[in-house]
């Protein structure tokens, strides 16, 4: 598993030569409604085990939460279940709002 900062994930998303990763937001629905990265998929952390079939094991996945701890746990879970290209957004959506998109609401 890789751990990337918000600017590093932004650069990854901007690169046209790479496969675009799935942005897996594992926060609760109310958190996702408050703010999220455009194109992110919302699957709350507690539902990940029952939702694995929604995810492509061969596609890069960036796990996102509020500060990076829940997403780290999900990233480890995904790796343990055969997902090979897992990335954790360190600092979570909060870091994204501070370092990449200052117009994004925070909570």
Image (cartoon, rainbow, N blue to C red):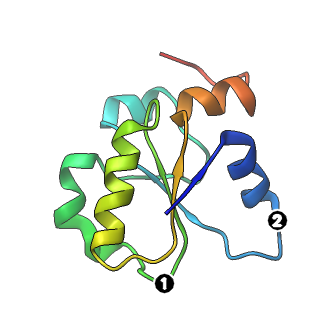
Residue contact at pointers 1 and 2, CB within 8 angstroms: no
Secondary structure beneath disc 2? loop
Mark 1: give few (<14), some (14-19) or many (20+) Cα within 10 Å.
few
Find disc 2 in the rendering and name its residue. Answer: 15
Tell which of 11 and 5 is nearer to you: 5
In this picture, is 35 found above or below 37?
above
Which residue is drawn at the image coordinates 19% and 48% (left, top)?
46
Secondary structure beneath disc 1? loop
Find disc 1 in the rendering and name its residue. Answer: 58
Question: How many marks on residues?
Answer: 2
Which residue is drawn at the image coordinates 74% and 59% (left, top)?
12
Which residue is drawn at the image coordinates 32% and 49% (left, top)?
73
Q: CA distance from mark 1 to mark 2?
A: 19 Å
Which image quadrant for residue 57? Answer: bottom left
Which image quadrant for residue 68? Answer: top left
In this picture, is 99 found above or below 50?
above
In this picture, is 8 found above or below 85?
above
Q: Which mark is residue 12?
A: none
Earlier residue among tags 1 and 2: 2
Which image quadrant for residue 96? Answer: top right
In the shown orientation, is residue 103 left or right of residue 84?
A: right
Tell which of 61 and 36 is nearer to you: 61
Residue 60 position, x and y percent, is 55, 71
Residue at the outermost bottom position: 58
In this picture, is 43 found above or below 35?
below
In the shown orientation, is residue 76 left or right of residue 16?
A: left
Residue 65 position, x and y percent, is 43, 39
Residue at the outermost top position: 107
């Amino acid at each position: 598993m890789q751990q990337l900062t918000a600017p590093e994930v932004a650069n990854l998303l901007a690169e046209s030569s790479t496969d675009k990763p799935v942005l897996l937001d594992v926060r609760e629905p109310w958190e996702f409604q408050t703010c999220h990265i455009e194109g992110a998929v919302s699957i709350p952390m507690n539902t990940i085990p029952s939702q694995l079939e929604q995810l492509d094991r061969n596609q890069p996945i960036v796990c996102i939460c509020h500060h990076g701890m829940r997403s780290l746990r999900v990233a480890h879970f995904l790796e343990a279940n055969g997902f090979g290209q897992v990335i954790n957004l360190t600092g979570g959506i909060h870091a994204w709002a501070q370092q990449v998109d200052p117009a994004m609401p925070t909570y």
